Amino acid sequence: MQAPAMPSAPLLDVQDLGIAFGGKPVVQGVSFTLAPGEKLALVGESGSGKTITALALLRLLDGARLQGRALWQGRDAAAAPRDLLTLPERQMRALRGDEIAMIFQEPMTALNPLMPIGEQVAEVLRLKRALSPAQSAREAIELIARTGIPDPARRARAFAHQLSGGQRQRAMIAMALACQPRLLLADEPTTALDVSLRGQILDLLDELRRDTGMAVLMITHDLQLVRRFADRVAVMQHGQLVEQGATAALFAAPRQPYTRQLLASRPERDVDESPPAAQAVPVLVAESVRVDYPVPLPGVRGWFRKGRFTALHGASFGIAPGRTLGVIGESGSGKSTLAQAALGLLPFTGTLHVAGRAWRHRASADRPLRRVVQVVFQDPFSSLSPRMTVEEIVGEGLLVHEPALGAPERAARVRQALADVGLSEAQFPGLLARYPHAFSGGQRQRIALARALIVQPRLLVLDEPTSALDVSIQKQVLALLQKLQKERGLAYLLITHDVDVVRALAHEVLVLKDGQVVESGPALQVLASPRHPYTQALLAAA
């Protein structure tokens, strides 16, 4: 797509930005400009300083010492630029959400769990655009529909926990775009989205950019997204900009070794390709598993009874020890519902056996199975309690399943589990006493993996285990999962929208659409020669 002609005066001019906490610099000497309508991608590994650079522009960093300048032109082209780093807080509050909006990386922690998402979008419209309650409610539904959420009027009444990860991300996007900002700070805006919806969101952002002249500063680890969307790329490492330039030129001829390393970081397949032994008993067997949710009926009928929404229609599959079943499909296709059924967290019909036993949906009866099957969630930040130390988080399973262990033995097991996933006290002094916020996204995901492994499960449910990680860390985590599977014979139920992750890790694949299995078979065979049109469309979008 042809980039718009850039005027001489930039919309945002960041000059020698420095950020320090407690006297320790974490970002140094960052300088870049952003013109109206321009799309700049800020890329780099987890912990390189991308997100806090964006947060500094909105002054959302408590306790940070900021240096340099960030000159903001705003809506009034005739007025003198204002320095965002020194602007009074009252003026910053007026800018936030109106002229400069932000899409945060982790929608589950950014959305209010006590308000329907439609009300959260409408709240922005009432506060920033002074719309009436009725007007804001109507426009909120229109914004939700524009981001691609199906049945927007019904979804507007849903709470965050009732939406899929991709739907929560789109609700965040609707909130950010409510006031048609001049600059959108997009922190991993498509992390939780499947490949087809990712394209829809990029098209939506591009349409708004053309219509309103909105600039986009995109923080992402998805290099394919950068290649498709951005006009320019800025690469960060250890809090410094090491390279920036036009997207096509930088991808074609990166100058810095670090940039070349990022571009070369793609998942590699390293799994045991031998078929499972004939006598091997599957760890997980599902036959005609169906999941229904009650939904309110419109009008007077809803007073007396509930309707039914079928999220999963009769899925059947098996997973042998040392094998991985990859489940792919668009957001809302039933992937996470299938995972929750496998974990015994949802009522279902049909047959589902874990290690030869069925879920009873009673805490005491199901406790032995809780040790056999563990889960690693999509969002490592919200899945780890911020009030618990690493030792408490990782060792919690031992308190339930091995209560006779003493504190010294439990601490030793915690250290070993952390060492197994590549975290040691030599790297992180005082590791066991630290809290999750002290770690990067990739490190938090390793902690979550250690928590799952410490009780020695036979099956891991991996719900988008690498979607929140940058490409190099993603490659490391996948290599770790491959290594653990070979060493321990673990079975994996892999829920993902990332075709590259399926290609690297899965032995078999299951394709879901609207809760129905439309295709299944050996992973490499299905990915190379998909038969169903829906699978073909998914792979083409990837």
Image (cartoon, helix red, strand yellow):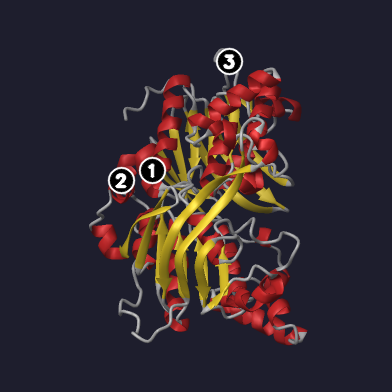
Q: Distance between the residues labelled 3 and 2?
A: 44 Å
Q: How far apart are marks 3 and 1 (CA)?
A: 37 Å
Instruction: Return the residue at label 1.
Output: 196
Residue furthest top in the image: 78
**Taking 61 as reference, is 351 above or below it?**
below
Q: Is mark 1 on a helix, strand or loop?
A: helix
Three-letter code for the amino acid on which mark 1 is drawn: Ser
User: If you read the primary sequence from the N terminus, does the residue marked by circle 2 or circle 1 appear first?
Assistant: 1
Q: Distance between the residues labelled 2 and 1?
A: 8 Å
Q: Where is residue 428 in the image (x, y as percent from the top left)?
A: 64, 71
Instruction: Return the residue at label 2.
Output: 537
**Taking 429 as reference, is 106 above or below it?**
above
Instruction: Return the residue at label 3.
Output: 76
Three-letter code for the amino acid on which mark 2 is drawn: Ala
Q: Position of residue 364 (x, y in %)?
A: 71, 75
Do the residues bearing badges 2 and 1 touch, measured as CB atoms within 8 Å? yes
Relative side of 409 to 460, left or right: right
Q: Is mark 2 on a helix, strand or loop?
A: helix
Relative side of 403 to 151, left or right: right
Residue furthest left in the image: 529
Residue 13 visible at all: no
Residue at 64% x, 24% y is 137
Q: Quadrant of residue 384?
A: bottom right
Q: In which quarter of the image is residue 5?
A: top left
* Quadrant placement of the N terminus: top left
Q: Is mark 3 on a helix, strand or loop?
A: loop
Front residue (pair 529, 64): 529
- The circle drawn on residue 1 is none
User: If you read the primary sequence from the N terminus, does the residue marked by circle 3 or circle 1 appear first?
Assistant: 3
Three-letter code for the amino acid on which mark 3 is drawn: Asp
Residue at 73% x, 70% y is 433
The crowding category of the residue bearing disc 2, from other C-alpha atoms within 10 Å (few below 14, some 14 to 19, many at least 20), is few
